[in-house]
Image (tube, grey):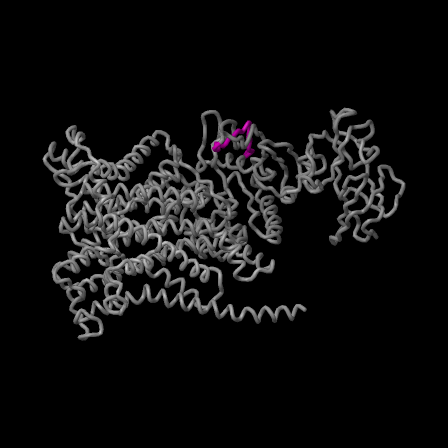
Amino acid sequence: MTTLKVEGLRKTYQTGRGGVAAVQDISFTVEEGRFYTLLGPSGCGKTTTLRCVAGLERPEGGTIVLGGATWVGPGRFVPTHDRDIGMVFQSYAIWPHLTVFENVAFPLRVARTKRSKAEVASAVGEALALVGLEGLESRAAPQLSGGQQQRLALARALVGRPKLLLLDEPLSNLDAKLRERMRIELRELQRRLGITTIYVTHDQGEALFMSHRVAVMHGGVIVQEGTPKDIYNDPATGFVADFVGSATFLAGPLAADGVHALGGIVRSRAVDGLEVGAKALLVLRPESIVVRPAPAGRTNEFTGTLRQAAFLGDHLDCVIEIESTLVRAYAHPSTPLVRGQTVAVEFPEDHCVAIADDGWRPRALTREQAD
Amino acid sequence: MAAVSVSRSAGRTRPTLRLDILVLGLAVALLAYLALVPLGMLFLGSVSESGTLFEGGFTLRHFQRVVTDPSALELLSASFLYSAGAALLAFAIGTAMAWVVERSDVPVRNLWYGLALVPLIIPGIVHTIGWVFLLSPEIGWINAPLKALFGFSLPVYSLPGMVWVQGLHDAPFAFVLMGAALRTMDPSLEEAAAAARANPLQTLRRISLPLLLPASAGVLLILFVRTLESFEVPAIIGLPGRVFVYTSRIYLSLNQYPPNFGLAAAFATTLLGISVIALATHRRLTRRSEAYATVTGKAYRPRRVELGRWRWVAIAVLVLYAFGGVFLPIIVLFYSSFLRVYVVPSPESLGTLTLSNYAFILTDDTTLRALGNSALLGVTTATVVVLFTSVIAWLTVRSKTPGRGILDFMAFVPIAIPGIVLGISLIWVYFTVPIRIYGTLWILLVAYVTRFMPYGMRSLSAGLIQIHRELEEAAQAAGARWWPTFRRITLPLLRPVLLATWIYVFIISLRELSSGILLYSSQSVVLAIRIFDLREAGQYTAIAALSMILIVSLVLLVAVLQRFGGRTVRAS
């Protein structure tokens, strides 16, 4: 069993003006063989959490247990080098004074169980083959390209067959095309090896694409945890809805059958516990909104003015003004739409869920908060 | 329309292209005159038969003496032992401090950082004389009680004494360089080793030390060359102890009667050769360590080792260095500056404290002339260096002028020329060419500008590189031509660096001794030389007073520099 259990993790940083809580009381469990992602904007505490799991930071409280081994607990702190982990750093941390072969062989050379030359060579060869770097063994590490360094870092993390793989934004320094390819490879590799993995990223696309489970972090706490589908379809807060995917927010008091907004009622269901009259937020994903040149007589249909329609190949990215609210929607690319015309917009009822309004507003369409 | 504007602007660029080639040509010619002509003359002087260039044919007898003289081997080994010893001592102290300050959780880090940098301000001659006051065989603060209690004293006038004093003086320099090496090492390289299950000792041995090796070797070589070129300790401590190294031997050859210019030139050429070889090796080493640099663009948050109980040991060592290496020599000078005659402090001597030394300093004509000369020379040198090197730096960093590589290289050549070698080279130049400036402030200005140009160059090109090229290109895109761009964009952005460089060059001009010691006259005497002269006249307490004045003005200048330049002084 190599399930990772983190409970009540706390870590503060000392700054010039006192302590800043980086991580406050975080708990999560990564089941054996799962790909678990900590997702959040910079400064949310995701990297600190990962570094606590790695033993590179010493938390003030909480426990970290992998399988039967307690790494962090009351009066107990296992140093990094005694934890059975493999780690890929954001900068890759390829040792420039060692060759490709020696970089990968390092975890084997410092291991307590001594291996013969042949064993080391075959393990290194295997790890390099795993990431597609065969034949580069004698190359000096700084001569590798960014993508190759990334693969090398991965091979080095895997060569010792660790129980837990930690990945700290490993794709963020690659260019877009390479990043796309590496995320496919990384996903495939993790599924094939079945290694328990924690992945840290600020890229929601990566998180949704690769993970079994995602924890969205904000301000040092986990605000929502679940499968990528849960997170996307049923965001718990305005922040999660805004951070994961794009969304238009309709804010208003909850009615019996919907939310007061756009000069009427937008019919929707509400999450449990939200009472009529409470401040509610309707989260609308652009791809679930239907845009038509003329009304079709559906429920939840509103008319508005088309402010923008940008052709993106597989869809038209539209901004529609309804009752002075800007709504973002994707229309079929062949829809005949002209900027400035009146359009009908339908919010299919089964895609509309009202959540409690915590005051968070999306950044994309809010002019005042543009940064 | 587009075609017309292109051809018109192409028509305009042609003359400016010629202009910058012209400027570059002039700069190369001037640099050649400043740096290469003296070295050429020096070499010719070392093989000249008659002692006058271009007369009486050539000879190798001076070099023959350099090699076959019975004392030649002694000179070589003393120079080597002195330089290697002081380099190792400075490296050991500096590295230990750098590690504690950069990599451990020692408290009040900024205080140690500031303290470690103070000695960089203290002129070598002041530091050396401070140690003479402490370790003087009969009456030194340390030796007098030792002698009274145990009947022996520490021999300051000896090779170990020289190593000790010079090593302590260069320790902050090693601290700055090794601190930078430690800071720029990506801590995730060490973290990756821990994640690969290497224990701390394995991480140190297999990752940290190998990664620091090229930088350490480079720092050691630089320290070696600095010591080899140093003049203060060899003259003030070495000569009385009859320990001769190259710099003091050159000085002696010219100060004996009759002076032997040819022999001095041959020794200087030999010293120059060693220095050039060491610096060339250093250049190769740093190239290799640059190849190690992995650019991530991420700010490093260094991992600090928790010292636990050891923190008190660390603090004790830092305090000991701060007190012994930094303050003790200053305190002894401060105290002595109020004495009529130098004595070990006692209740009686406290009663005889006097301001007469300061009165003497501030009324002595020669000393006042030295003060004025130093200020004038400092201002002029700093201004000339900043003006000249800002043009050179712009040409090498920003322009695409052909030949800018040569310019860059030539502006750095003087870094390999020891001060005393530059001095004797300039003697040869101005005894030969019909420009009668020997013994005037002009020749000192030539020496200082030549010697400090590389520092201005390094500082200004680093400053220029930091100004993103796109800032200038945006000005051009907005319609500004070269001069408006330079005046309204580049110069204002560069102003803090220009100011910092000016003050820095001013400071090192005030401290300079070795290049001027062979070139001055009673009319062109400067502060450091005045201190040197007063010492030969035995007026130690007056020196103490003058040293205090020098230290206070330098500290004030550095405070100004810190305020305006916003960065710490780099070592000379």
| Residue A159 sits inside the magenta stretch | no
* Residue B202 is at least partly visible in this image: no
* Residue B158 is at least partly visible in this image: yes
Closer to the camera in the image, B477 or B166: B477
Q: Residue at x 42, y 50 (%)?
A: B499
Closer to the camera in the image, B214 or A365: A365
A45 over A276 or under it: above or below: below
Q: Tell how many labels.
A: 0
Q: Is residue B191 left or right of residue B224?
A: right
B62 over A125 or under it: above or below: below
Closer to the camera in the image, A212 or B211: B211
Quarter of the image with the N terminus of chain B in it: bottom right
Locate residue A203, reporting x and y percent.
62, 43
Q: Residue at x 50, y 45 (%)?
A: B298
Based on the displayed image, in which of its 4 quarters is residue B4 positioned? Answer: bottom right
Q: Is residue B128 left or right of residue A5?
A: left
Q: Is residue B283 left or right of residue A31?
A: left
Locate residue B567, reporting x and y percent.
42, 45
Based on the displayed image, in which of its 4 quarters is residue A108 positioned? Answer: top left
Locate residue B258, reporting x and y percent.
12, 62
Closer to the camera in the image, A146 or B318: B318
Q: Residue furthest right?
A: A297
Query: Would you say the magenta stretch is mainly helix, strand or loop?
Result: strand
Which residues make up the magenta segment?
A: A1-16
Locate residue A138, reporting x and y percent.
44, 57
Q: Residue at x 33, y 64 (%)?
A: B34
Q: Residue furthest left?
A: B151
| Residue A8 sits inside the magenta stretch | yes
